Amino acid sequence: MAPPARNLPIPALLVLEDGRTFRGESFGAEGETFGEAVFSTGMTGYQETLTDPSYHHQVVVMTAPHVGNTGMNDEDEESSRIWVAGYVVRDPARVPSSWRSTRSLVDDLRAQGVVGISGVDTRALTRHLRERGAMRVGISTTETDPERLLARVLDSGEMSGANLSGSVSTQEAYVVPAEGDKRFTVAAVDLGIKGNTPRMMSQRGIEVHVLPATATLADVQAVAPDGLFFSNGPGDPAATTDQVELLQQALGAGIPYFGICFGNQLFGRALGFGTYKLKYGHRGINQPVMDRTTGKVEVTAHNHGFAVDAPLEGSTATEFGEVTVSHVCLNDDVVEGLELRDPEGRLRSFSVQYHPEAAAGPHDAAYLFDRFCELMDGKA
Protein backbone atom coordinates (compact mmCIF):
# COMPACT_ATOMS: atom_id res chain seq x y z
CA MET A 1 0.00 0.00 0.00
CA ALA A 2 1.42 3.37 -1.04
CA PRO A 3 2.04 5.96 1.71
CA PRO A 4 -0.41 8.90 1.81
CA ALA A 5 0.53 11.90 -0.36
CA ARG A 6 2.22 14.77 1.47
CA ASN A 7 1.59 18.43 0.74
CA LEU A 8 5.12 19.62 0.10
CA PRO A 9 5.84 23.32 0.65
CA ILE A 10 5.92 25.48 -2.48
CA PRO A 11 9.22 27.34 -2.86
CA ALA A 12 9.06 31.14 -3.05
CA LEU A 13 11.62 33.75 -4.03
CA LEU A 14 12.01 37.35 -2.80
CA VAL A 15 14.28 39.81 -4.61
CA LEU A 16 14.89 43.44 -3.61
CA GLU A 17 15.70 46.08 -6.21
CA ASP A 18 19.33 46.20 -5.07
CA GLY A 19 19.65 42.46 -5.81
CA ARG A 20 19.45 41.12 -2.24
CA THR A 21 17.72 37.75 -2.43
CA PHE A 22 15.82 35.63 0.09
CA ARG A 23 14.30 32.19 -0.43
CA GLY A 24 11.45 30.70 1.53
CA GLU A 25 8.08 29.04 1.14
CA SER A 26 4.82 30.27 -0.32
CA PHE A 27 2.50 31.83 2.28
CA GLY A 28 -0.77 32.81 0.68
CA ALA A 29 -1.68 32.78 -2.99
CA GLU A 30 0.66 31.40 -5.62
CA GLY A 31 1.93 33.73 -8.30
CA GLU A 32 3.99 36.89 -8.42
CA THR A 33 3.68 40.36 -6.92
CA PHE A 34 5.60 43.64 -6.79
CA GLY A 35 5.54 46.67 -4.53
CA GLU A 36 7.54 48.77 -2.12
CA ALA A 37 9.16 46.71 0.65
CA VAL A 38 8.48 48.20 4.10
CA PHE A 39 8.69 46.77 7.59
CA SER A 40 6.12 46.98 10.40
CA THR A 41 7.19 46.71 14.03
CA GLY A 42 3.75 45.83 15.42
CA MET A 43 3.66 42.68 17.54
CA THR A 44 -0.15 42.57 17.40
CA GLY A 45 -2.84 43.82 15.06
CA TYR A 46 -1.72 42.10 11.86
CA GLN A 47 -5.32 41.90 10.62
CA GLU A 48 -5.69 45.66 10.97
CA THR A 49 -2.38 46.14 9.14
CA LEU A 50 -3.40 43.92 6.25
CA THR A 51 -6.72 45.72 5.78
CA ASP A 52 -5.33 49.26 6.13
CA PRO A 53 -5.70 50.94 2.69
CA SER A 54 -2.52 52.95 3.38
CA TYR A 55 -0.55 49.79 2.60
CA HIS A 56 -1.80 49.70 -0.99
CA HIS A 57 1.13 48.86 -3.34
CA GLN A 58 3.37 47.92 -0.41
CA VAL A 59 4.89 44.56 0.53
CA VAL A 60 4.85 44.40 4.33
CA VAL A 61 7.64 42.66 6.23
CA MET A 62 6.57 41.73 9.76
CA THR A 63 9.34 42.14 12.33
CA ALA A 64 7.49 40.00 14.88
CA PRO A 65 8.58 36.40 14.20
CA HIS A 66 5.24 34.66 14.89
CA VAL A 67 2.31 35.83 12.81
CA GLY A 68 -1.19 34.40 12.45
CA ASN A 69 -1.55 32.97 15.97
CA THR A 70 -5.01 34.45 16.50
CA GLY A 71 -6.35 33.77 13.01
CA MET A 72 -8.74 36.16 11.27
CA ASN A 73 -12.22 37.36 12.22
CA ASP A 74 -14.97 39.64 10.90
CA GLU A 75 -14.69 42.33 13.61
CA ASP A 76 -11.09 43.58 13.35
CA GLU A 77 -10.95 44.50 9.67
CA GLU A 78 -10.27 48.17 8.91
CA SER A 79 -11.78 47.95 5.42
CA SER A 80 -13.57 45.50 3.16
CA ARG A 81 -10.43 43.74 1.89
CA ILE A 82 -6.72 43.10 2.29
CA TRP A 83 -4.73 45.91 0.65
CA VAL A 84 -1.09 44.89 1.01
CA ALA A 85 0.63 43.97 -2.25
CA GLY A 86 2.52 41.14 -0.55
CA TYR A 87 3.31 39.72 2.87
CA VAL A 88 6.56 38.51 4.41
CA VAL A 89 6.70 36.55 7.67
CA ARG A 90 9.21 34.38 9.41
CA ASP A 91 7.23 31.74 11.32
CA PRO A 92 3.50 31.60 10.52
CA ALA A 93 1.15 29.85 12.91
CA ARG A 94 0.25 26.38 11.74
CA VAL A 95 -3.09 26.47 13.55
CA PRO A 96 -4.80 29.65 14.79
CA SER A 97 -5.81 29.67 18.44
CA SER A 98 -8.43 32.23 19.46
CA TRP A 99 -12.11 32.01 20.35
CA ARG A 100 -12.68 34.95 17.99
CA SER A 101 -11.02 33.30 14.99
CA THR A 102 -13.24 32.20 12.11
CA ARG A 103 -10.52 31.33 9.60
CA SER A 104 -6.76 31.24 9.25
CA LEU A 105 -4.54 34.05 8.00
CA VAL A 106 -3.18 31.96 5.14
CA ASP A 107 -6.72 31.11 4.01
CA ASP A 108 -7.59 34.81 3.77
CA LEU A 109 -4.39 35.58 1.86
CA ARG A 110 -5.17 32.81 -0.61
CA ALA A 111 -8.82 33.78 -0.97
CA GLN A 112 -7.90 37.38 -1.77
CA GLY A 113 -5.01 36.56 -4.08
CA VAL A 114 -2.26 38.00 -1.88
CA VAL A 115 1.16 36.51 -2.63
CA GLY A 116 3.36 36.04 0.43
CA ILE A 117 6.49 34.27 1.59
CA SER A 118 7.38 32.62 4.90
CA GLY A 119 10.50 31.06 6.36
CA VAL A 120 12.45 34.24 5.61
CA ASP A 121 15.01 35.71 7.99
CA THR A 122 12.89 38.81 8.57
CA ARG A 123 15.43 40.17 11.04
CA ALA A 124 18.10 40.26 8.35
CA LEU A 125 15.62 41.65 5.81
CA THR A 126 14.50 44.38 8.22
CA ARG A 127 18.08 45.36 9.03
CA HIS A 128 18.78 45.59 5.30
CA LEU A 129 15.79 47.91 4.76
CA ARG A 130 16.74 49.87 7.88
CA GLU A 131 20.20 50.52 6.45
CA ARG A 132 19.41 50.85 2.74
CA GLY A 133 15.89 52.28 2.91
CA ALA A 134 12.51 51.19 1.57
CA MET A 135 12.81 49.85 -1.97
CA ARG A 136 10.94 47.92 -4.62
CA VAL A 137 10.63 44.17 -4.22
CA GLY A 138 9.20 41.15 -5.99
CA ILE A 139 7.88 37.89 -4.54
CA SER A 140 7.31 34.91 -6.80
CA THR A 141 6.32 31.27 -6.50
CA THR A 142 6.74 30.77 -10.25
CA GLU A 143 10.21 32.24 -10.85
CA THR A 144 13.36 30.52 -9.60
CA ASP A 145 15.97 32.76 -11.25
CA PRO A 146 16.76 35.85 -9.11
CA GLU A 147 18.14 37.79 -12.09
CA ARG A 148 14.96 37.38 -14.12
CA LEU A 149 12.81 38.40 -11.15
CA LEU A 150 15.10 41.37 -10.46
CA ALA A 151 14.58 42.62 -14.01
CA ARG A 152 10.82 42.67 -13.43
CA VAL A 153 11.27 44.39 -10.07
CA LEU A 154 13.23 47.18 -11.77
CA ASP A 155 10.43 47.54 -14.32
CA SER A 156 7.76 47.93 -11.62
CA GLY A 157 6.39 51.27 -10.45
CA GLU A 158 7.87 53.34 -7.62
CA MET A 159 5.99 54.91 -4.73
CA SER A 160 7.41 58.37 -5.41
CA GLY A 161 5.08 60.15 -7.78
CA ALA A 162 2.23 57.67 -7.24
CA ASN A 163 -1.29 59.09 -6.84
CA LEU A 164 -3.18 56.21 -5.21
CA SER A 165 -5.93 57.64 -3.04
CA GLY A 166 -8.56 57.40 -5.77
CA SER A 167 -8.05 53.65 -6.09
CA VAL A 168 -8.74 52.99 -2.39
CA SER A 169 -11.50 55.55 -1.77
CA THR A 170 -15.21 54.84 -1.59
CA GLN A 171 -17.00 55.49 -4.85
CA GLU A 172 -20.26 56.54 -3.19
CA ALA A 173 -20.83 58.77 -0.20
CA TYR A 174 -22.25 57.17 2.93
CA VAL A 175 -23.17 58.23 6.45
CA VAL A 176 -22.05 56.85 9.81
CA PRO A 177 -24.68 58.13 12.28
CA ALA A 178 -23.81 59.63 15.64
CA GLU A 179 -24.18 57.43 18.70
CA GLY A 180 -26.59 58.97 21.16
CA ASP A 181 -27.31 62.68 20.80
CA LYS A 182 -25.91 64.24 17.66
CA ARG A 183 -23.48 67.08 18.45
CA PHE A 184 -21.70 67.75 15.15
CA THR A 185 -21.69 66.96 11.44
CA VAL A 186 -18.35 66.19 9.79
CA ALA A 187 -17.50 65.78 6.11
CA ALA A 188 -14.79 63.10 5.97
CA VAL A 189 -12.92 62.79 2.68
CA ASP A 190 -11.97 59.15 2.19
CA LEU A 191 -8.38 58.90 0.94
CA GLY A 192 -8.06 55.38 2.35
CA ILE A 193 -10.05 55.71 5.56
CA LYS A 194 -9.93 53.01 8.23
CA GLY A 195 -13.19 51.75 9.71
CA ASN A 196 -12.29 52.74 13.25
CA THR A 197 -12.00 56.44 12.33
CA PRO A 198 -15.70 57.26 11.72
CA ARG A 199 -16.54 54.86 14.55
CA MET A 200 -14.50 56.90 17.05
CA MET A 201 -16.07 60.12 15.81
CA SER A 202 -19.52 58.56 16.01
CA GLN A 203 -18.89 57.65 19.65
CA ARG A 204 -18.42 61.37 20.35
CA GLY A 205 -21.77 62.36 18.88
CA ILE A 206 -20.50 63.16 15.38
CA GLU A 207 -22.54 62.31 12.30
CA VAL A 208 -19.89 61.42 9.73
CA HIS A 209 -20.55 61.90 6.02
CA VAL A 210 -17.81 59.89 4.27
CA LEU A 211 -17.16 61.39 0.83
CA PRO A 212 -15.16 60.04 -2.13
CA ALA A 213 -11.65 61.33 -2.81
CA THR A 214 -13.13 63.23 -5.77
CA ALA A 215 -15.30 65.39 -3.49
CA THR A 216 -15.50 69.12 -4.29
CA LEU A 217 -16.10 72.07 -1.99
CA ALA A 218 -19.74 72.01 -3.11
CA ASP A 219 -19.99 68.36 -2.02
CA VAL A 220 -18.50 69.26 1.36
CA GLN A 221 -20.76 72.25 1.88
CA ALA A 222 -23.81 70.23 0.82
CA VAL A 223 -23.72 68.33 4.12
CA ALA A 224 -23.50 71.61 6.12
CA PRO A 225 -20.50 70.37 8.12
CA ASP A 226 -19.20 71.71 11.40
CA GLY A 227 -15.80 70.37 10.39
CA LEU A 228 -13.82 68.79 7.58
CA PHE A 229 -11.69 65.67 7.99
CA PHE A 230 -9.07 64.13 5.67
CA SER A 231 -8.14 60.50 6.31
CA ASN A 232 -5.01 58.43 6.00
CA GLY A 233 -4.16 56.93 2.62
CA PRO A 234 -1.43 55.68 0.30
CA GLY A 235 0.76 57.41 -2.26
CA ASP A 236 2.95 60.45 -2.67
CA PRO A 237 1.36 63.68 -1.33
CA ALA A 238 3.30 65.66 -3.94
CA ALA A 239 1.35 63.83 -6.65
CA THR A 240 -2.00 64.73 -5.10
CA THR A 241 -3.33 68.12 -6.16
CA ASP A 242 -7.15 68.07 -6.24
CA GLN A 243 -7.48 67.40 -2.49
CA VAL A 244 -4.94 70.12 -1.70
CA GLU A 245 -7.02 72.61 -3.66
CA LEU A 246 -10.18 71.43 -1.87
CA LEU A 247 -8.50 71.92 1.49
CA GLN A 248 -7.31 75.42 0.59
CA GLN A 249 -10.85 76.33 -0.46
CA ALA A 250 -12.26 74.91 2.78
CA LEU A 251 -9.73 76.80 4.89
CA GLY A 252 -10.59 79.97 2.98
CA ALA A 253 -14.26 79.32 3.76
CA GLY A 254 -13.45 79.05 7.47
CA ILE A 255 -14.32 75.36 7.90
CA PRO A 256 -12.43 73.80 10.86
CA TYR A 257 -10.14 70.99 9.72
CA PHE A 258 -8.62 67.84 11.24
CA GLY A 259 -6.39 65.51 9.23
CA ILE A 260 -4.44 62.36 10.02
CA CYS A 261 -1.50 60.76 8.25
CA PHE A 262 -2.00 61.52 4.52
CA GLY A 263 -4.36 64.26 5.68
CA ASN A 264 -1.47 65.79 7.62
CA GLN A 265 0.77 65.77 4.55
CA LEU A 266 -1.90 67.38 2.40
CA PHE A 267 -2.53 69.96 5.13
CA GLY A 268 1.17 70.82 5.01
CA ARG A 269 1.08 71.24 1.24
CA ALA A 270 -2.10 73.35 1.43
CA LEU A 271 -0.26 75.67 3.82
CA GLY A 272 2.71 76.00 1.46
CA PHE A 273 5.15 73.45 2.86
CA GLY A 274 6.85 70.74 0.85
CA THR A 275 6.86 67.02 1.53
CA TYR A 276 9.62 64.45 1.14
CA LYS A 277 10.08 60.71 1.17
CA LEU A 278 11.51 59.20 4.33
CA LYS A 279 14.34 56.71 4.01
CA TYR A 280 12.35 53.82 5.41
CA GLY A 281 9.27 55.44 6.97
CA HIS A 282 7.52 54.89 10.28
CA ARG A 283 5.34 51.80 10.59
CA GLY A 284 4.10 49.91 13.63
CA ILE A 285 2.43 50.60 16.96
CA ASN A 286 5.30 51.71 19.21
CA GLN A 287 6.46 55.10 17.91
CA PRO A 288 7.09 57.82 20.56
CA VAL A 289 5.67 61.26 19.73
CA MET A 290 5.61 64.42 21.85
CA ASP A 291 2.58 66.69 21.81
CA ARG A 292 4.36 70.02 22.15
CA THR A 293 1.15 71.79 23.15
CA THR A 294 0.95 69.72 26.36
CA GLY A 295 4.47 68.31 26.76
CA LYS A 296 3.08 64.79 26.95
CA VAL A 297 4.70 61.84 25.19
CA GLU A 298 2.44 59.36 23.43
CA VAL A 299 3.13 55.87 22.15
CA THR A 300 1.50 55.93 18.73
CA ALA A 301 0.64 53.87 15.66
CA HIS A 302 2.25 54.90 12.37
CA ASN A 303 2.11 53.97 8.72
CA HIS A 304 3.73 56.57 6.51
CA GLY A 305 6.64 56.90 4.15
CA PHE A 306 6.42 60.65 3.51
CA ALA A 307 6.66 63.65 5.83
CA VAL A 308 6.04 67.40 5.89
CA ASP A 309 9.06 69.69 5.52
CA ALA A 310 8.20 72.40 8.06
CA PRO A 311 10.43 74.27 10.54
CA LEU A 312 10.38 72.70 14.00
CA GLU A 313 10.83 76.03 15.79
CA GLY A 314 8.88 79.24 15.49
CA SER A 315 5.80 79.87 13.41
CA THR A 316 5.19 80.35 9.69
CA ALA A 317 2.82 82.97 8.34
CA THR A 318 0.40 81.78 5.65
CA GLU A 319 -2.64 83.32 3.97
CA PHE A 320 -4.78 81.25 6.37
CA GLY A 321 -2.98 82.10 9.62
CA GLU A 322 0.09 81.17 11.67
CA VAL A 323 1.31 77.59 11.48
CA THR A 324 3.44 75.77 14.05
CA VAL A 325 4.69 72.20 14.44
CA SER A 326 2.58 70.74 17.26
CA HIS A 327 3.93 67.18 17.40
CA VAL A 328 7.37 65.70 16.75
CA CYS A 329 8.73 62.14 16.59
CA LEU A 330 11.21 61.56 19.39
CA ASN A 331 13.17 59.00 17.36
CA ASP A 332 14.20 61.30 14.51
CA ASP A 333 12.54 64.74 14.92
CA VAL A 334 10.20 64.18 11.97
CA VAL A 335 7.20 66.54 11.93
CA GLU A 336 4.22 64.66 13.37
CA GLY A 337 1.60 67.40 13.60
CA LEU A 338 0.65 70.93 12.55
CA GLU A 339 -1.54 73.64 14.07
CA LEU A 340 -3.11 76.60 12.30
CA ARG A 341 -4.16 79.57 14.45
CA ASP A 342 -5.83 82.86 13.65
CA PRO A 343 -4.26 86.28 14.50
CA GLU A 344 -5.85 86.14 17.98
CA GLY A 345 -4.19 82.77 18.65
CA ARG A 346 -7.34 80.68 18.39
CA LEU A 347 -6.97 77.20 16.92
CA ARG A 348 -8.48 76.99 13.42
CA SER A 349 -7.29 73.59 12.18
CA PHE A 350 -4.80 70.88 13.07
CA SER A 351 -3.41 67.56 11.90
CA VAL A 352 -1.20 64.69 13.02
CA GLN A 353 0.99 62.33 11.03
CA TYR A 354 0.09 59.22 13.00
CA HIS A 355 -3.08 57.22 13.73
CA PRO A 356 -5.14 58.27 16.77
CA GLU A 357 -7.81 55.76 15.70
CA ALA A 358 -5.27 52.94 16.14
CA ALA A 359 -6.68 49.45 16.36
CA ALA A 360 -5.61 47.19 18.03
CA GLY A 361 -3.82 50.08 19.77
CA PRO A 362 -2.18 51.98 21.33
CA HIS A 363 -4.85 54.45 22.42
CA ASP A 364 -2.70 57.28 23.83
CA ALA A 365 -3.76 59.66 21.04
CA ALA A 366 -7.55 59.14 21.16
CA TYR A 367 -7.83 62.57 22.81
CA LEU A 368 -7.31 64.16 19.39
CA PHE A 369 -10.90 63.35 18.47
CA ASP A 370 -11.97 65.23 21.59
CA ARG A 371 -9.76 68.12 20.51
CA PHE A 372 -11.56 68.10 17.15
CA CYS A 373 -14.89 68.35 19.00
CA GLU A 374 -13.58 71.28 21.04
CA LEU A 375 -12.42 72.93 17.83
CA MET A 376 -15.86 72.61 16.23
CA ASP A 377 -17.46 73.78 19.47
CA GLY A 378 -15.28 76.89 19.53
CA LYS A 379 -13.56 75.88 22.76
CA ALA A 380 -10.12 74.90 21.41
Image: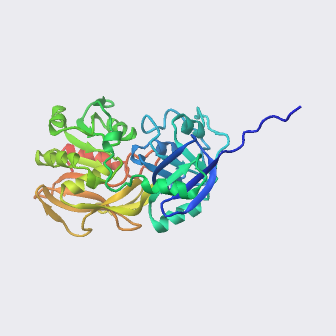
Q: Is 292 placed above or below 74 here?
A: below
Question: In the figure, residue 167 lies in which quadrant?
Answer: top left
The residue closer to the viewer here, 262 or 133, is: 133
Q: Is 119 placed above or below 255 here?
A: below
- Look at 37% across and 63% down and name the residue there: 278
Q: Is 226 placed above or below 330 here?
A: above
The residue closer to the viewer here, 25 or 354, is: 25
- Look at 21% across and 41% down and name the residue there: 227
Judge left or right: residue 205 versus residue 121: left
Q: Can residue 42 be seen in this view?
A: no
The residue closer to the viewer here, 28 or 361, is: 28
List the single residue furthest toward the right: 1
Judge left or right: residue 266 versus residue 233: left
Q: Is 120 placed above or below 189 here?
A: below
Question: Where residue 175 appears, x then y in whole percent?
Answer: 29, 30
Structure colour scheme:
rainbow
The residue closer to the viewer here, 133 or 250, is: 133
Judge left or right: residue 103 versus residue 315: right
